Amino acid sequence: MSIEIRHISKQFGSFRALDDVSLDIASGELIALLGPSGCGKTTLLRIIAGLETPDAGSIHFSGADTTGVHVRERGVGFVFQHYALFRHMTVFDNVAFGLRMKPRRERPSEAAIRAKVMELLSLVQLDWIADRYPGQLSGGQRQRIALARALAVEPKVLLLDEPFGALDAKVRKELRRWLRRLHDELHVTSIFVTHDQEEALEVADRVVVINQGRIEQQGTPQQVWDNPASPFVYGFLGDVNLFKGRARDGRIHLDDGLQLDSPEEAAAEGTEAFAYVRPHELDVQRYSPGQALDAQGRPSGLVAQLERAIVVGPLARLELVPDGANQSADNAHPASLIEAHIPAQQFYDMGLREGETLVVTPRRARVFLDYAAGI
Ligand SMILES: Nc1ncnc2c1ncn2[C@@H]1O[C@H](COP(=O)(O)OP(=O)(O)OP(=O)(O)O)[C@@H](O)[C@H]1O
């Protein structure tokens, strides 16, 4: 079943939680709604479910307007972060609940219910705990049972609101891989709400980034990661270094003296510019006098002190303080920390020490012009 979201707006008092949101979700797709706390993800999910009424706009399931359809009639399954299972019922009875509550003429026989529940429990790989009570399960097992219960009534749409939010990092990782495999088997149109970018990028076919009640960007995980549409998305999808500067003579002059190519649209002289560089996009070399200049005598990199190095596993995270001597005279901004990520092996091979002077050079930068830095 496809879902079409058309111009949805929602206010709570004077607060605008959703502002003209439109989105098409294809049948069988797994979409992640990603954004910071309070951006409106849950409100959108609740409107799709029919638990909340929009002030404006409409929701269509496979082309049919469902705006006035009651939540019970929408064929939606839910899994929430704290969707408590019935504590006094066994795992089996929890999963069977929705089937047993069906009107008599739609209700399967007890034998058919048993077969269906056991099939679902084996799908979530928990058929061996059918007789246990929720209090005897781990958090991850409980969420898998909650998912089996949601799937029992064969929903046309599955809505998951931070389903793994309360679990520890390792279990979360296992469960999201498991959810992805399950989705590949079942192909139920699913919407997954999370504020965790790694989770969204790993699980979803398509990621929809929401900020302050509006969609900032949508695309495959690769598309949004490679080409963030705004400073907000850039900052939200991972660590980033922000360098400020101005457009001059067709190039971007950073406050640190470094020059970058201007973005495609011609930058008006003097326009404020923000260059975003991910920590792994910085080359790091040991400094020697004169080395940080290009053939025209312009800085080719930023001279900075290695203040701290954190080496964990295969990665060395370097915290660098830009060298004031290399900054242009009109620099009004205080030096901020630069973070560079290099392979741990390179760190050891170079024999880097805290306190040394290094040169960092962006291999790639994304420049946004005259744009309030959204991070
Ligand atoms: N019933 C309500 N009454 C008043 N304000 C509300 C109500 N529901 C949500 N809000 C506000 O609307 C905004 C969006 O809330 P929503 O729950 O959709 O955010 P979210 O992106 O899901 O955040 P989180 O990740 O923290 O759950 C928040 O500022 C919230 O305080």
Image: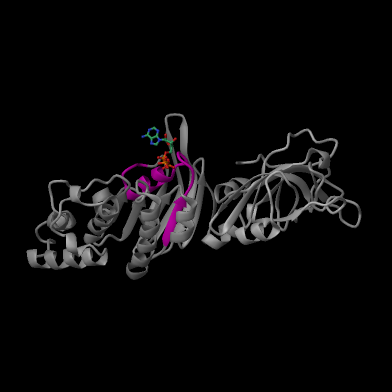
Q: Quadrant of ligand 1?
A: top left
Q: Is residue 102 visible?
A: no
Indicate the position of residue 89 as horizontal and vertical percent values: 13, 50
In the rendered structure, does residue 184 fall within the stretch colored magenta?
no
Q: Residue furthest top?
A: 14
- Please tell me whether residue 137 is drawn above or below residue 322 in the rendered image: below
Residue placed most toward the observer, 239 or 158: 239
Residue drawn at point x = 33 percent, y = 58 percent: 157
Applied colour scheme: one colour
Indicate the quadrant containing the C terminus: top left, top right, bottom left or bottom right: top right
Q: Which residues, given as a range, are shown in magenta? A: 30-53
Asked if 350 appears above or below 166 in the picture, the reply is below
What is the x, y in percent for residue 253?
81, 46
- Total labels: the figure holds 0
Which quadrant is home to the N terminus? bottom left
Q: Is residue 17 visible?
A: yes
Residue pictured at 73% horizontal, 44% vertical: 305
Between 127 and 19, which is closer to the camera in this rendering? 127
Q: Residue furthest right?
A: 296
Q: Quadrant of residue 56?
A: top left
Q: Is residue 42 above or below residue 143?
A: above
Q: Seen in the image, is 88 located left or right of residue 287?
A: left
Q: Residue at x 36, y 55 (%)?
A: 171
Say left or right for 17 vs 143.
right
Magenta run includes residue 46 = yes
Residue 17 percent across, percent down from the top left? 45, 38
